[in-house]
Amino acid sequence: MEISVQMVQIFAIIVSFLSLAVAAWLYTWVKSQPSSNPKIAEIGEYIRKGANTFLRREYMILARFAGIAAVLILIFLPHPIWKGEISQNILMAVSYLFGTVLSALAGKIGLAIATIANVKTAEAAKKGIKPAFMTGFRGGAVMGMAVVGTCLLGVTVVLMVVGDATSVLGFSFGASSLALFAKAGGGIYTKTADISADLVGKVEMGIDEDDPRNPAVIADNVGDNVGDCAGMGADLFDSNVASISAALVMATSFGGAAGEKAVIMVFAYAAIGLLSSIIGVATARIGKHGNPTRALNSSTYVTTAIFAVLTALATYLFDFRWEIWGATAVGLLVGTVIGITTDYFTNDLKPPVRAVAKASQSGPAFTILSGFSYALLSSLPALIGIALSALLAYKICAPLGDGYGMFGISMSALGMLSIVGMIISNDAYGPIVDNSRGLAEMGGLGHDVIAVTDELDSAGNTVKAVTKGFSISAAGLTVISLLGAFMSEVNTAASELGIVEAGKKLIENFDIMNPTVFFGLIIGIAIPAIFSAMLMLGVDKNAQRMVGEIHRQFDTIPGLKEGKADAKPDYDKCIDIATVGALKELIPAGIVAILATVVVGFIGGAEAIGGYLTGNIASGLLLALLMSNAGGLWDNSKKYIEAGNHGGKGSVAHKAAVIGDTVGDPFKDTAGPSINTQITVVSLVASLLSVLFIQFSIF
Amino acid sequence: MEISVQMVQIFAIIVSFLSLAVAAWLYTWVKSQPSSNPKIAEIGEYIRKGANTFLRREYMILARFAGIAAVLILIFLPHPIWKGEISQNILMAVSYLFGTVLSALAGKIGLAIATIANVKTAEAAKKGIKPAFMTGFRGGAVMGMAVVGTCLLGVTVVLMVVGDATSVLGFSFGASSLALFAKAGGGIYTKTADISADLVGKVEMGIDEDDPRNPAVIADNVGDNVGDCAGMGADLFDSNVASISAALVMATSFGGAAGEKAVIMVFAYAAIGLLSSIIGVATARIGKHGNPTRALNSSTYVTTAIFAVLTALATYLFDFRWEIWGATAVGLLVGTVIGITTDYFTNDLKPPVRAVAKASQSGPAFTILSGFSYALLSSLPALIGIALSALLAYKICAPLGDGYGMFGISMSALGMLSIVGMIISNDAYGPIVDNSRGLAEMGGLGHDVIAVTDELDSAGNTVKAVTKGFSISAAGLTVISLLGAFMSEVNTAASELGIVEAGKKLIENFDIMNPTVFFGLIIGIAIPAIFSAMLMLGVDKNAQRMVGEIHRQFDTIPGLKEGKADAKPDYDKCIDIATVGALKELIPAGIVAILATVVVGFIGGAEAIGGYLTGNIASGLLLALLMSNAGGLWDNSKKYIEAGNHGGKGSVAHKAAVIGDTVGDPFKDTAGPSINTQITVVSLVASLLSVLFIQFSIF
């Protein structure tokens, strides 16, 4: 059967709207669920207000940043304004802004549903695990469907209107730069509040996690929403856009009929991925006393299987190349394997978590050392998976012709991210049920209800490990294909500028033995390290301020410690500290990463950037895997001890495990996942500025 | 003036013997110092015996390993025995064994002098800082002079006798493989004992660091000797040999007169480096109330200056190329700058250490988070330094002709390591004075004497940070040049085997965009991570066992807690636990690193190995810098608090800082410095096996 680019784009738009419609229906469904408890409603309102305030203030700052970036793009990209046509620059700047707006929207939608679903889930938990699970899951699915629908819609519209893959990169950069700051800001906020609340509440005073006396408890719940929901939504929006963009740049570089065919495949596969996620979400079910972890995982596997079958069908019907389907399938398969191995290192049924729990009996130093060591080990399977899928995807597709090997890698990344709609749904489920747990406790719904929410929460944590492994690996592959996109941008620009003859390439390879490449590589290693360090120092400083404030409130508000009815903590003050601190710390780290790219590019040109991006991938993958898995491992070790092992709550082991968990919190929720976005942003900046680097570098 | 290869080799041998003579003289001097205190003599004897027992048992295991490796070399290298001449294989195997023996000897000498100098230094401390410093320093210098003298002698003899740079690689591999295990074994031993002694003694019971009641106290002092002295001696022996070997491989690859000239430069510069160190050691002085840190640093700077001047003189006299002198000078300069920046992050007069100390007031999680973050930041200046020196050295030398750029990098590494004699002297000084502090306390020499040893010890810690920055960076540069050596080995082998025509190259580059190279790169990232994880888990497991034993002794030996005169702890049992545990854990980590190299080589051939070595360098440098600096930072934060800040000893901040220090111990003394050796070993294995990889790989 024949299919044109336009037809497939229309198909993509239809699926996008279907996805948005499903999101709208699920939103209405969640909203229609009962909520009668006035106490919960009141606290829920506090959380909603706090979250919205933060997001509004964050977006105001980011709007300024985006404005400045748009002006710079207008002046310099794709060509300095005095050298090229201004219309191109306008299109690029508009694409960029469109990317930032849609990314911000993704965050906003996530926040809107999460702050409703948390209340409804707490309420539903009174009726048992089944209704509570469905409410939490469908809340998450609103976000999943909305984000991926918006994403595919955005990319398709930009390419249809502008008709130029470089502008898609601009759109992608818009999404990524906003995601970078949203993730960083949200990540700092959430962990500032979480750590401070835990340290004073759980560790020092021995009160429960969500005890309403704790002045930071609302800020903590706000943090779940702005960090884990809004930040994560922007983050996966960005990965998804970046993977499609990289594939499109590669596809269009073939030119002619081959290029069209490749573009068609990219859209077809991306749309089928979204369609599979819609089916997966719609069919998610849980028995009356069912296991929520199993329910989440089985939806994921269903989605994966549907994707594999539907893409095979499309490949057969439209006569796509089976090699490329193979590359996509490799990505999907390896993603699943990585998810399973990540689970091994962070699941409390498996040896690593148990070993760390056992080591905690000898004190916190052993918790840290053993957890850190296992997390280092955990990088191996994921790295082998990434290495193998890149190698296989390349080798499978390379025989199709020049450039197809690299295109295969980008399709492999697309395959890994194909089920991203499902992944976001699962991921957003986590903070929603976490919040509902807090609401159930603060609302005094009693032990049985809290137990239900605890079970839901634990499933969220387990599934999170799997989805995180997935998204880090996908980001890894995406960045590899962005490296390919960078090279093709450089060569296109060089021949447009007349630096090389038409058809010739300025850069044939990035040779490690070339000292300029090597120079970039070594500098590139440092960037994810300093980026994550700056974020963590932000949390550290901010949390110290907040701990001071919590102490102050307990010391000065009479009756607060004893829990007298009229002694109310000043929740707003804590929310304010978290907000102000996060907003102050979120910009510098991102700016450093972007500026370093610019400096290296102007020192060593395209070759140095080739090495630099490689160094970024190398240290970024290592640190992201290390930090995410260490955090998950420590979190679950603590939970394992709290379940009554090694002395249970209050024991020496528990105290040590709580310290491990506190260290792990910014590892896994601030620094780790932000690194993904950082390496994507850096790659996109490099591609966009390539035309400047080849003209104006020192070496 | 004209100079032949033979003349310069004879010069190198003369300088080597001079160095050994100085070592012998210093040894006699240290030994002739008075020691009258019977209590100290008794404890010193305990330590000496424990250390010798460990070393003997370790060497017995390593002898078996070396024997097996030698047989494998005999069969397979440089060519499978059924394909080449057996005489070459015999020479290679003998060179390998010679390397292991000399490396073992370096460790043995270090241990012998350290276990004498500790007693003498404690004794000398009664007379004041000047005699104590001189005893400690000269003890360290015995090791410095002996190690570097042996090293230069060994390389020169191997090249003179065998006349083939590949055999020098074999010799270097012998030295490295032994160093790998010695460093790993010693590192596990020392931190097992140190952590356990501290946790039970300082943290739980609140007794002093070197309280003789603590059953692990002798094991702790033994650890200083076997880990920090013997292990470190073997480690720097290895780096030094590797840097000279890499330069020699590069030099001989030029062939003809140019090759000879390059070989002459390598030997001349290496010999002048040793000569400068001898002068630096001989002129080291301290005033009566002088500052030991300043004394150590000024000797280092004197050595550096002498090296720069003498090499310039040699370059002038013998008409060497100034470009190459420039590359060497760049290495030396950058090494110094890296040392200074490392000092910034680990010196308690500077902001990072103070910030971590301040953060400790909020509890151990903040100690860990802030220390880890600053350590991540600290990687930046060192990485920039390495990147710049590689780039500059290459760019300065590249105009001299094909291959000279890479030769420049290897000479830059040689420049950084030129003053290694001085560095080892300073480094070995550390554990000697650390031990003497323990002896002074256990021997009851009183507060004033302990204060003297404390001051010496603190100088040792500060200088250690600088020398560690130096040696990690030098290892980084060395491995870059080993990457060059690997490529030239591959091409030589390919043309010898007739795979390519004479004069043609099998491998022109290691292109990151080549999926096989990329595959190797990603796998390579994981290796230093799992290697260091395995070592730390070794410490972790072992220390848990030892903590159990210390508890058992305190619980079952009557009167021990109270310090009754007749209640003696069972020191030997703790020494035994440390020994057995270290020996059990040291082999697997090293084997994994070596095996992974072999597997990647046989999967992806030389191209995959090119990427693999790069991945190793990337993650190895990052982790080594991170771990070494984090450890130093935590250690000094603790000391800063112990000096009376933030509540001093016993405060909340102090308890948190002790936990940080405990985590940092295996970071900085087990994993961090071993990574250097690991990446060197992996590079050497790759070069040696290159001939097999190009014939028998899958892809």
Image (spheres, coloured by chain):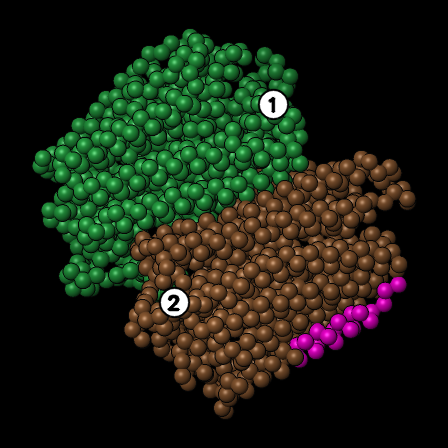
Chain colours: A green, B brown
A10 left or right, relative to A170:
left
Q: From which residue to which does the magenta span run?
A: B18-36
- Whether A555 is drawn above or below B348: the answer is above
Can you identify the residue that label 2 sits on? B490
Camera-nearest residue between A552 and A320: A320
Query: Quadrant location of residue A334?
Result: top left
Estimate how packed mark 1 is, as few (under 14), some (14 to 19) or many (20 or more) residues with alpha carbons within 10 Å: few
- Whether A250 is drawn above or below B290: the answer is above
Which residue reaches farthest front?
B82
A22 left or right, relative to B114:
left
Instruction: Determine the residue positioned at 16% across, 31% down.
Output: A11
A461 left or right, relative to B189:
left
Residue A70: give x, y in percent of width and height: 27, 44
User: For residue A64: magenta?
Assistant: no
Q: Chain of mark 1?
A: A
Tell me, for residue A644, which label it has, or none: 1
| Distance from the alpha carbon under mark 1 to that under mark 2 | 58 Å
